[in-house]
Image: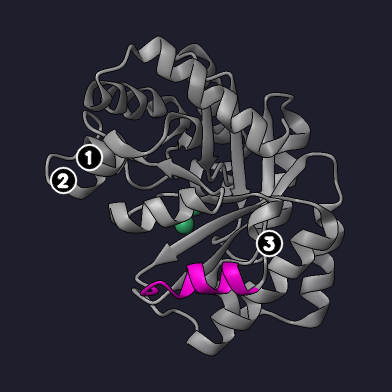
Amino acid sequence: MIDSHCHLDPGVYGGDEGVDAAIARARAAGVSRMLTVGSGYGFESAHRAVAVARRHADVRCAVGLHPHDASEYTDARFAELLALAAAPEVLALGEMGLDFHYDKSPRDQQRAVFRAQLRAARAARLPVIIHDRESAGETLAILDDEAAWEGGVLYHCYTGDRAQMAAIVARGGYISLPGIVTFKSATEMHAVAREVPGDRLLVETDAPFLTPVPYRGKKNEPAYVTYTLAEIARLRGEDPAALDAQTTANTARFFRW
Ligand SMILES: [Zn+2]
Ligand SMILES: [Zn+2]
């Protein structure tokens, strides 16, 4: 099983020892690979993600500028990020995109930083991890406009509806579902989980947040992706082992991992 999106940031897990302990618990739970995302926890989180991946052969990473942090963009930082992305441990650029729910950075800056990263990803031949919150379809429109789909597009922590899911899948995109799918109230996500084509589905924790039932309320960690996978298998009426094999293969294919 692979946790396709977590934030194994030492600042969140009590230093390197805390991160290593969380990785050890994941291995014990049957999670054989983890993708830690160095984006969204301040600019320096990209460097910290690469460092964690260098320490662990079963951890790889992505680096990017989160829409929350778009106002931190400078040309020098962007050049630094792209240099970092050339490391063999880096399998994707992201997470990147638009977040009009929190609006932590001005929208024009979010759009500009998103487009700059899409162009950089294409140049570097890296797939992209998308963060989209309440952008009213604008994220999708920018992906179309930048001709991003061919390079590989993954919507992480997908919280949109079935219609948008179908539009993403029709363009060749992938959908990753988080622990929210274990919440009774998440009825549209349940519908997405049932309908998304099996060859486009990934699972993730987005740790340290969005902890699945039965640990909801506690700090999330990669070991708990097992609960998310089990719930999706239940919703789809599939054998959990078969779904695990398929989502693992999807993740490996998407990231060329
Ligand atoms: Zn996100
Ligand atoms: Zn994330």
Residue type, mark 2 in image:
Thr
The residue labelled by disc 2 is: 187
Residue 70 percent across, percent down from the top left: 59, 77
190 within the magenta span: no
Relative horizontal placement of residue 142, taking residue 162 as reference (left or right): right
Upstream in sequence: badge 3 or badge 1: 3
Quick check: can you spot residue 207? no
Residue at image coords 61%, 37%: 35
- On the image, which quarter does residue 19 sit in? top right
Residue type, mark 3 in image:
Glu
Looking at the picture, tell me which residue is in the foreground, 246 or 79. 246
Residue at image coords 51%, 28%: 22
Relative horizontal placement of residue 61, taking residue 13 as reference (left or right): right
Relative height, residue 22 to residue 106 (above, below) = above
Report how far apart the C-alphas of labels 3 and 2 lie in the structure.
36 Å
Quick check: can you spot residue 193? yes
Residue at image coords 78%, 60%: 122
Q: Which residues are magenta?
A: 135-145
Relative height, residue 57 to residue 74 (above, below) = above
The mark lying in front, picked from 3 and 2, is: 2
The local crowd at label 2, few if under 14, some if 14 to 19, many if 20 or more residues have their Cα within 10 Å, is few
Residue 182 percent across, percent down from the top left: 23, 35
The local crowd at label 3, few if under 14, some if 14 to 19, many if 20 or more residues have their Cα within 10 Å, is few
